[in-house]
Amino acid sequence: MPSKLGSLPVRTPQCSTSQTNDHTYTQLGSIFYLTTFYKRDEIAFRLALFYGAATIAGAFSGLIAFGVFQIHHDSIPGWKFLMIIEGGITVLLAAFAVWWLPESAAKCRWLTDEEKAMANARMLQDSSKATDEKLNIKLAVKKILDWRIMAYAILAFSYGTASSIVGNFLPQLVGRLGYSSIKTNLYTVARKF
C-alpha cells in the first residue's frame, strides 16, 4: 500500500495543479515570444516542435523521478532531491535565457543592421501596424474587456485542464493499486504516448 500521512495518501511527485498552471503560463509566454520572430505562416511548425518537445518531456518525467528516487540520503527524502534538481535546472536556464535571448529581432545583438532591418520588414509584412510601438493602456484595457476577448480568454486558459488531468491523476490512481511511489512513477512513464 502507498504510505499514508494521516488519512491522506502521500502524493507521488508529479505535476500539481499550481505547477500545471505555471507550465500553461510559461507555454503562453513562449508562444508569444515565438510570434515576435516568425510570421503567421511560419509559426505553426515551430509550435508543433514546441508542443512535441513538451509531450516528450512529460513522458519522461516519471522516469526521471524514478532515477532521482534512487538517491538515498538520511536527511533529504527523494522528493526534495527531485524538487532541488528540477528547480535548480529551471532557475539556471531562466537566468541564461534572460541574458541570452533578445527582446526582438530588431534588438538581436548577433544580427547585422541589414539583417535586423530585414527581420523587421518581414514582421511588418505580417502585421497590421508598426512593430515595437508604445503600449496604449486605455486602448489595451478597452480591447481586453471586449466580451469576445474575455470569452476566448476563458477558453484559452482552460486548454491545460483537459491535458493535465491524466498527468495529475494517473499517478494517484496507479499508486492506489498498491504500488510504491517508485514503481508508480515507472508505470506512468508512457502515459503521453
Image: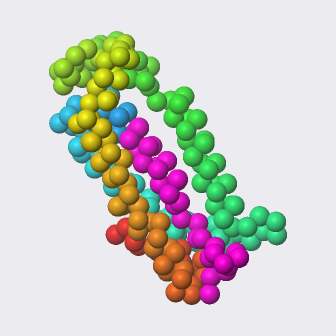
For the residue pair 99 and 164, the one nearer the viewer reads as 164
Quadrant containing the C terminus in the rendered view: bottom left
Residue 171 percent coordinates (x, y): 50, 73
Q: Is residue 87 left or right of residue 134?
A: right
Residue 4 part of the magenta segment: yes
Question: What's the residue at 37%, 33% (across, down)?
Answer: 33
Quadrant containing the N terminus in the rendered view: bottom right
The part of the image, by quadrant, that contains residue 153 is top left
Task: Count all numbered tags in the image, as a single digit.
Answer: 0
Residue 149 percent coordinates (x, y): 27, 35
Residue 153 visible somewhere in the drawing: yes
Vertical arrangement, residue 187 with respect to residue 19, above or below: below
Vertical arrangement, residue 49 with respect to residue 161, above or below: above
For the residue pair 57 and 164, the one nearer the viewer reads as 164
Residue 13 percent coordinates (x, y): 58, 66
Residue 122 visible somewhere in the drawing: no
Residue 116 percent coordinates (x, y): 32, 17
Residue 191 part of the magenta segment: no
Vertical arrangement, residue 83 with respect to residue 69, above or below: above
Question: What's the residue at 56%, 35% (across, down)?
Answer: 96
Question: What's the residue at 35%, 39% (across, down)?
Answer: 31
Image: magenta residue range: 1-30
The part of the image, by quadrant, that contains residue 179 is bottom right
Colour treatment of the image: rainbow
